[in-house]
Amino acid sequence: MATEKKKWAEEISTEILLAATKALKKWKEKKAEENEKSEVPTLLEDEREIVNLMVSVKELEKPVAKGHRSNNRATRISLKHSIYAGENQEICLFVKDPEIKWNEKLLEKKEVGNLTEVMGITRLRNEYRGHHQKRQLCKEYDLFLADERIIPLLPTLLGKHFFQKKKHPFKINLQKDYVPERICKLRDSTFLHTSNGPLRQVKTGWTDFTSQQIVENVECILNCLPTTFDNIVNIGLKTNDSPTFPIYASYDMELDISG
């Protein structure tokens, strides 16, 4: 069974992964040069974009337990190079009241890098009532975590925008020991969201990562895909506005992945 998870290595070489990564980075550099020459204003995000691994499957994974929404399910995957521990990444943790307890434990002691906000459920409810405030909160942080005891309350308090952007909080048990270490474990992971469709999108790295860093993160993800490799139609890399740079297509499908 252990070899089944690494079957992708028989089909995808490191050279292919590097070639796709370098092609994407070259496209990004060319796009940046074009933007500099253009009189059309560009967004600040153009400077640095998330790189996604796109995976299409033939058959959907096993359904989640009755009463749960399949498009909110996520598989945690540890990465070699964290995408949430960079200089400008910020993490928000939702907790049970009183929040001051966790501010003292985590923020004041600075035990978790990139954790910049601890917010109690009362403050979340009072300060982020409207759709605009909720959208702003969603944009403000790169990763959201939450005490597992308040998870059932969050869909209503955060709104559907969080879930549409795949930024709904990931639960953590704050009643166990080694909380800072377990937060760091979540920070240094990515999350594969399942859905009712065949496409899976996994945050893999940033465009300012080296090609080797992106490749090593891709390998971490491929090692942990919650499906057999025989069930995969194609795999590629892309940013939000780039074409898809393919790295694999099954033999019975044409290699035609449009951006």
Image: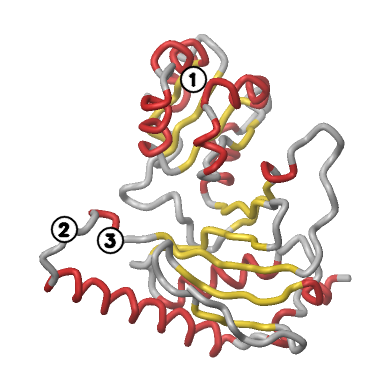
Residue at left offset 42%, top offset 77%: 211
Mark 2 is surrounded, within 10 Å at the Cα level, by few (under 14), some (14 to 19) or many (20 or more) other residues, namely few
- Circle 2 residue: 41
SS at badge 3: helix
Seen in the picture, residue 223 relative to 160 is either above or below; the reply is below
Amino acid type at mark 2? Pro
Residue 103, x across and y down, in percent: 43, 20
Amino acid type at mark 1? Trp
Counting residues from the start of the chain, the first of labels 2 and 3 encountered is: 2
Amino acid type at mark 3? Asp
Seen in the picture, residue 248 relative to 160 is either above or below; the reply is below
SS at badge 2: loop
Residue 12 versus residue 252: which sits nearer the camera? 252
Q: CA distance from mark 2 to mark 3?
A: 11 Å
- Circle 1 residue: 102
Q: Which mark is residue 46?
A: 3
Q: Which marked residue is nearer to the observer: mark 2 or mark 1? A: 2
Residue 225 versus residue 79: which sits nearer the camera? 225
User: Which quadrant of the figure has residue 138?
Assistant: top left
